[in-house]
Image: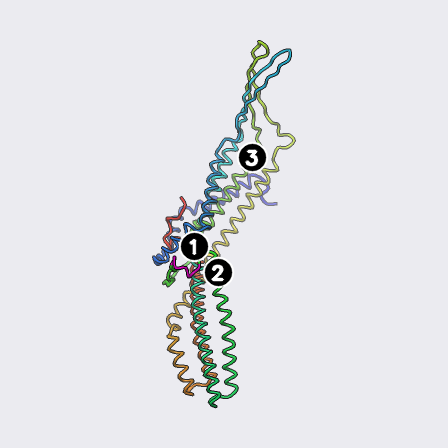
Amino acid sequence: MLFTNTQVVRGVFVVVVSAWLGLSGKFAYAENEIQLVAAPGEIQNFIKQILPNHPRFIAAQAELDSVKANLNAADKAIYNPELELDTEKTNINTSYIGLSQTIDWGDQRGAKTQIATNQLDASKANFQSERQLLVRDLLMALSDYQNTTRLADLSNQRLKLMKDFYSVARQKYAAGDINQVELDLAQLAYNETVLKNAQVLAEQVDAEQSFYAIYGITPTNKKRLLPDLSVDFQAVNIPANLDAFVMTLPQMRLVRANVEASKNLIALRESESSADPTIAIRGGKEDTESLAGLTLTIPLNIRNNFSAEIDAARKDYLQAEHLAQLAYRNLRGNITSRTRQYQLTRKAWKQWLATGKVSMNRQLKLLKRLWQAGDLSTTDYLVQIKQNLDTHSAGIELQTTLWSSWLNWLDTTAQIESWLQLNNTRNK
């Protein structure tokens, strides 16, 4: 088996930590490598009002405070002194008082304090990750609601258009201007629109409920106006010094802290296996004679030397190291994929803005006029109406995808707080 002795285990740790420390000199550069244009003030203020009072934020803060309290508890003495009083009345009256203290010979207190410190580092990193995830979810719910509302408005417009189209088609059929096949086509188009409209409205209801679940208010609540999400999405690239950049992220700091805690757990198990002596002094009287005594008690770890617990801690440490390597690879890959996804979506959005965003109402009125004048067949009219409406619907859906890609990139690269200027919410 690999890593079966203490020397190899410690050797692995030295190599890994050395690699991390070798990157630490580049951390300051990596943290400033991504330069972001700040989000619009309207969005910043909206999130700043919501975030501090959100239940998820408060719960994450409470968890961090709990870990801080655990650090304070871990730094306390392991053993308290013991007071013993004894009196005996027989033919000879005996009374004495004793005081004993067990010595933390293996320094369990120091090991527990180190572990608690590592856990606090992990909790701080986790708090930052949870806070960023909450901000992402808040903006995602807002974006989904606003875009599904726009899709619902477009769907209602489509339904009205198809209803009017079917009504006019029936009139034209009665006048002999179109045949039965064209009338049936108009009816099928109207029926299809009714079904699709119901589906779009149901999706809007889901988005509204998701909004309520995370914000605690309905989107139509007048007490809090929703910000405009019109954002000039900026270009981003994969950080040039990606390896160093990954090590600065809270996700990786959390993993590194867990590795350190696993290492210090070995020290704790070793300290727990030490023979902690107990020293006791006592004094008293036996009739008229004074008594004084000193006792030293040392446990004999013969039947159980606690080596199994130490071995288990070493294996846990090896597991933590390998999981850290896996987390590093996954995070590095996520940054690359999220960046490329956003770049592709942003490129498509820019192309749509340049070529696909035309006046829908003007086109629809022109098509209707041509069809009613007989210059456009019923089939061609339906095809062009569908193409026009689908293009605008696709634009709204593309904007939703772009927002999702942007927020996921900000979350993965831990830049969402910088973008929103939320430094004042960071726990020190």
- Give the mark, 3 or 1, whose residue is nearer the N terminus: 1
Q: Position of residue 215 (x, y in %)?
A: 44, 56
Q: Residue at x 53, y 27 (%)?
A: 103
Q: What is the magenta range?
A: 218-224
Q: What's the residue type where badge 3 is placed?
A: Glu
Q: Which image quarter is the C terminus in?
A: top left
Residue 335, compared with residue 173, is above or below; it is: above
> Which residue is under mark 1?
135
Residue 108, compared with residue 191, is above or below; it is: above
Q: What's the residue type where badge 1 is placed?
A: Val
Q: Position of residue 53 (x, y in %)?
A: 42, 50
Mark 3–mark 2 Cα distance, whole angstroms, equals: 53 Å
Camera-side mark, 3 or 2: 2
Q: What's the residue type where badge 2 is placed?
A: Gln
The answer to which of 6 and 421 lies nearer the viewer is 421
Find out whether residue 221 is within the magenta segment. Answer: yes
> Which residue is under mark 2?
209
Helix, strand or loop at label 3? It is helix
The answer to which of 248 and 179 lies nearer the viewer is 179
Callout 1 environment at 10 Å: few (<14), some (14 to 19), or many (20+)? many
Helix, strand or loop at label 2? It is helix
> From this viewpoint, which residue is outermost toward the bottom?
176
Does residue 129 appear anywhere in the picture? no
Camera-side mark, 1 or 2: 2
Helix, strand or loop: magenta stretch: loop
Q: Is residue 8 left or right of residue 242?
A: right
Does residue 262 appear anywhere in the picture? yes
Find out whether residue 297 is within the magenta segment. Answer: no
